[in-house]
Image (spheres, rainbow, N blue to C red):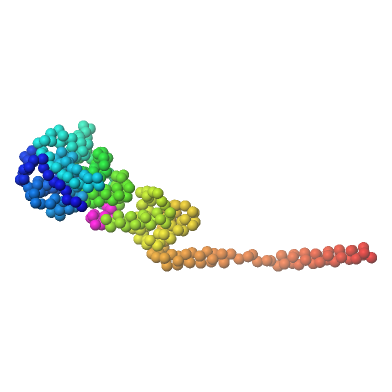
Amino acid sequence: MADIHLHMETGHQVTCVSNFFIDHYMKDAPGEYVKIYLYLLRTLSDPERVFAISAMAAALEHTARDIRLALQYWEDAGLLSLTYDREGELCDICLLHPESSPESVHQEKRISSRDVLHPVESEPTVAKAKPAKPAAAEPVNTPEPASERTMRAYSAQELLSFQEDDEVRSILFIAERYLGHTLSSTDLNYILFWYDELHMDEDMIDFLITDCLQSGKNSLKYMNSICLSWAEHGITTLEAAKADRQNHSHNASLVRQSYGISGRGLSPVELSFVHKWFNTYSFSDELVKEAINRTMMNIGQVNFKYTDKIMEQWHNAGIVDAEGVAAYDQKHNDEIKERFTKVKAPKTSDRSKDSFHNFSSQVEYDMDDIEARLLKKQL
């Protein structure tokens, strides 16, 4: 990628931080974004230094994505002007004087998720964002399963308290950028639920939103179902989350192909079946495909519940591989044959035999009589 031209409105070649920036911008910005802005100022003071996103990322131990998000943040705040070439690559960064950006403009361009955090008169005031831990003397109830947790609505005061946390502000900024719209109160409740109740950090939430958007899923309700699944299965790190999503993507793709589903993804209910087969039952790809094949052969249509019944029978029988399925089928067939062999024809009684004998004799007798009469007529 070509080098980016970084320059300033004036020709001052010194590292200088405006007091106006410190007083009016720095206090509201995430700490990492302040570091990136200061690095831009430092780069300007050294004309010989070649500026590039990759170089800044390496120097500050950030990712290129983090750098771009910070640059976009400062452009929204009115401190940078970013220019892109025809290919959409960043080619020019101009640092604007903080004093040239009126405070009113700065307030309008500040991260918009703050705008939805206005106080609501009907909301009670809450002192702290996170609930206090129970006293040692009080009995502690067993935590409810993650899948049964319900997302509560955070009060306006709680939302404002969360905004004092740099990590939360960064999460909300990233979410708003990725989703491409101003966060609603419902969106905020979802994200804070993940952070506050499910204890997901910024990296996990960043990965979650990115992964879902890349899969064509932009619903926070859908994302919330993934978060609940992670919490229920003890997935608490970014590495574990990535591994789960990789397996999940493979498993969902295999199920879609086996059913012949095209043109759509799986619904949350269907995905819950997929998770059950692969994670709860620990079935292999081979067994899942076999169960789906039997479903399509027997009823000729996609039916997750029908397939699940097959899986449940195999699981209850302790089946773990194809050999186990074959043995299970053989046992089932043997049981059917045994039931049929127990069904025998009823015995014929002696009375029935005598009746049949008399009937036969009578038939013979009648035939002789008819034959004699015919001979007599001929004579």
What's the residue at 71%, 65% (across, down)?
352
- Give the residue furthest to the top: 121
Left/right placement of residue 165 relative to residue 88 reads left
What's the residue at 43%, 64% (across, down)?
325
Q: Position of residue 353 (x, y in %)?
A: 72, 67
Q: Position of residue 288 (x, y in %)?
A: 40, 59
Q: Is residue 232 magenta?
A: yes
Q: Is residue 221 magenta?
A: no
Q: Position of residue 101 (x, y in %)?
A: 13, 36
| Residue 265 appears in the figure | yes
Left/right placement of residue 368 relative to residue 73 reads right
| Residue 135 appears in the figure | no
Q: How many marks?
A: 0
Q: Which residues are magenta?
A: 230-241
What's the residue at 90%, 66% (across, down)?
375
Left/right placement of residue 325 relative to residue 197 reads right
Which image quarter: residue 100?
top left
Judge by depth and name the residue closer to the eye, 287 or 231: 287
Vertical position of residue 351 compared to residue 239: above or below: below
- Give the residue furthest to the right: 379
Judge by depth and name the residue closer to the eye, 97 or 173: 97
Which image quarter: residue 256?
bottom left
Quadrant (top left, top right, bottom left, bottom right) of the C terminus: bottom right
What's the residue at 65%, 66% (across, down)?
347
Q: Position of residue 109 (x, y in %)?
A: 18, 37
Vertical position of residue 278 compared to residue 214: above or below: below
